[in-house]
Structures are given as structure tokens and as C-alpha cells.
Image: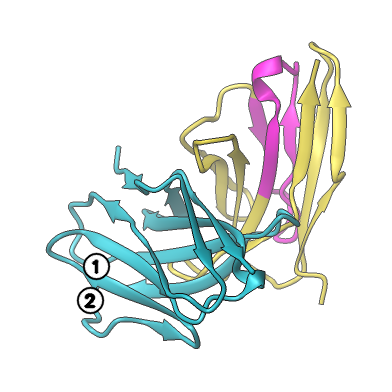
């Protein structure tokens, strides 16, 4: 069972570059979300989706775009990377609104 | 915004001891879900235990148990007979709305041999 798969594991970007963090799940979960983890701040919600075609903003959405064209995939796009976006990013999915989240293994992003 | 607070940035105990990690939260809801997640150095986020607020019985998973005090909005995690593999960051989290988890700042737990 693959669960939640995130790619890449590590990425270094220069300020102003764009990139997409990929996330895929094979559990047929409706709910998917992206979090970022910064030291001393726990995990904070960036964007989430309650089903294909439906996305919404979380606590820290600025600088990030998402789309959900299929149930399986939920990519996170950085259009113009900034040093403040240096962080560890986690994708997560769950079966319904109160089920525990299944997390991917994270992407460590550094923006110089 | 609703918040989750973990007041202990770091804790350290000897192997086989019992340790309790604290968590408080605020909410206006009567029913909700609370979680403890473990993050070892591998960076994985692993669910440790889950509590439904309407259930008065404290959740237990093997050596892990919670002390859920709904009126006090407190949700502490007790680890009994601690093992070296319990060394990790521990995050308390509460569901807010549709699958939006709000996390505490984390407690770094070190189990010493």
C-alpha cells in the first residue's frame, strides 16, 4: 500500500522560481490538505480540498495555489518562490471529516 | 482563531519511566476530535491516539493513554514504560471544521538509556 506519496523529498529553489509539489493518494480519500511545518510553530494548514473540483484556503494560503482535478492528486504550486517559503511541506488525506489524517513523508524546500 | 497550546517545548526522561505531555485548547464546539501525533527523526507524522470529545472514557493505545478533561479543555498524553523508540516530537491537534487540523507547537521528547 503506497498511502500518501509526496515528491520530491528535497528541493532547492532560487527566489522567484516556480515549482509544483506533487501529492497522490491511493486510498480513495475525499479529503486532502497541505500543511507547512516551521520550527516552534507546529504544522499550519495552507490549502485543503473536500473532494475533486473543490478547494479552499487554510491558515497560510498566500503564495500557494492548488487544484484538485482528480480524487487521487492534489498538487501544490509555488508561483514565485520566496525565502519565507523555506519549510517542510506535508500532504495529508483522510476518509471523512473526522477521520485521522494520513500524512506523506514531507518535502523539505529551501528557497535561497 | 482556535488555538492548541503545548506548554512544554522539551522533555527528557529515563527509559522505562512514565512521562506526561500537556496540551490545552480552546473551542466553542460541544463535539470535536483531538489527536496526538508523533514525529520521529524520520520526519513521518504518525497517529498515536485519538479522542472524541463526547466520549467520557479516556482513549488508550497500549502504552499510550490520554487524560481528557473536557471542562478544562485539557488533553494530556501519558506514555508508560517509555522506550528509546519513543524519542520524537509530539504534536497535539484538534479538528476544526472540515478536516482542518490545528496543531500545537510540539514537545520534543527524549528518552535516555
Circle 2 — which element? loop
Residue highlighted by disc 1: B31
> In this picture, which residue range is highlighted in magenta?
A64-90
Chain of the residue displaying label 1: B
On the picture, is B23 further left or further right than B39?
left
B74 vs B107: above or below: below
Identify the residue at horizontal 74%, vertical 26% (top origin): A78
Q: Nearer the viewer, residue B80 or A63?
A: B80
Q: Where the N terminus of chain B falls, by quadrant? A: top left
Residue highlighted by disc 2: B54
- Please check the rendered image and state whether residue A38 is part of the magenta-colored stretch, yes or no: no
On the picture, is A87 further left or further right than B56?
right
On the picture, is B69 further left or further right than B32?
left
Identify the residue at horizontal 67%, vertical 48% (top origin): A90
Residue B77 rendering spot, x and y as whole percentages: 39, 68
Residue B107 rendering spot, x and y as whole percentages: 48, 51
- What chain is the yellow one? A
Circle number at residue B92: none
Residue A67 in view, yes or no: no
Mark 1–mark 2 contact, CB under 8 Å? Answer: yes
- Please check the rendered image and state whether residue A79 is part of the magenta-colored stretch, yes or no: yes
Residue A43 rendering spot, x and y as whole percentages: 54, 44
Chain of the residue displaying label 2: B
Q: Nearer the viewer, residue A105 or B96?
A: A105
Circle 1 — which element? loop
- What chain is the cyan one? B
Identify the residue at horizontal 28%, vertical 73% (top origin): B67
Amino acid at each position: 500500500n503506497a498511502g500518501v506519496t509526496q515528491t520530491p523529498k528535497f528541493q532547492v529553489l532560487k527566489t522567484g522560481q516556480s515549482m509544483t509539489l506533487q501529492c497522490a493518494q491511493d486510498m480513495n480519500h475525499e479529503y486532502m490538505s497541505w500543511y507547512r511545518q516551521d520550527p516552534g510553530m507546529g504544522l499550519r494548514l495552507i490549502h485543503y480540498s473536500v473532494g475533486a473540483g473543490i478547494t479552499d484556503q487554510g491558515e497560510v494560503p498566500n503564495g500557494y495555489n492548488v487544484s484538485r482535478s482528480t480524487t487521487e492528486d492534489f498538487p501544490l504550486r509555488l508561483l514565485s518562490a520566496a525565502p519565507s517559503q523555506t519549510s517542510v511541506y506535508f500532504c495529508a488525506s483522510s476518509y471523512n471529516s473526522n477521520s485521522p489524517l494520513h500524512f506523506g513523508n514531507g518535502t523539505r524546500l529551501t528557497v535561497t | 482563531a482556535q488555538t492548541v497550546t503545548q506548554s512544554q517545548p522539551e522533555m527528557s526522561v529515563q527509559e522505562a519511566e512514565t512521562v506526561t505531555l500537556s496540551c490545552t485548547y480552546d473551542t466553542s464546539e460541544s463535539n470535536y476530535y483531538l489527536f496526538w501525533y508523533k514525529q520521529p527523526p524520520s520526519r513521518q507524522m504518525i497517529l498515536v491516539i485519538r479522542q472524541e470529545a463526547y466520549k467520557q472514557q479516556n482513549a488508550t493505545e497500549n502504552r499510550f493513554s490520554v487524560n481528557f478533561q473536557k471542562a478544562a479543555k485539557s488533553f494530556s498524553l501519558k506514555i508508560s514504560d517509555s522506550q528509546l523508540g519513543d524519542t520524537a516530537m509530539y504534536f497535539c491537534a484538534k479538528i476544526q471544521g472540515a478536516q482542518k487540523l490545528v496543531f500545537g507547537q510540539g514537545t520534543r521528547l527524549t528518552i535516555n538509556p
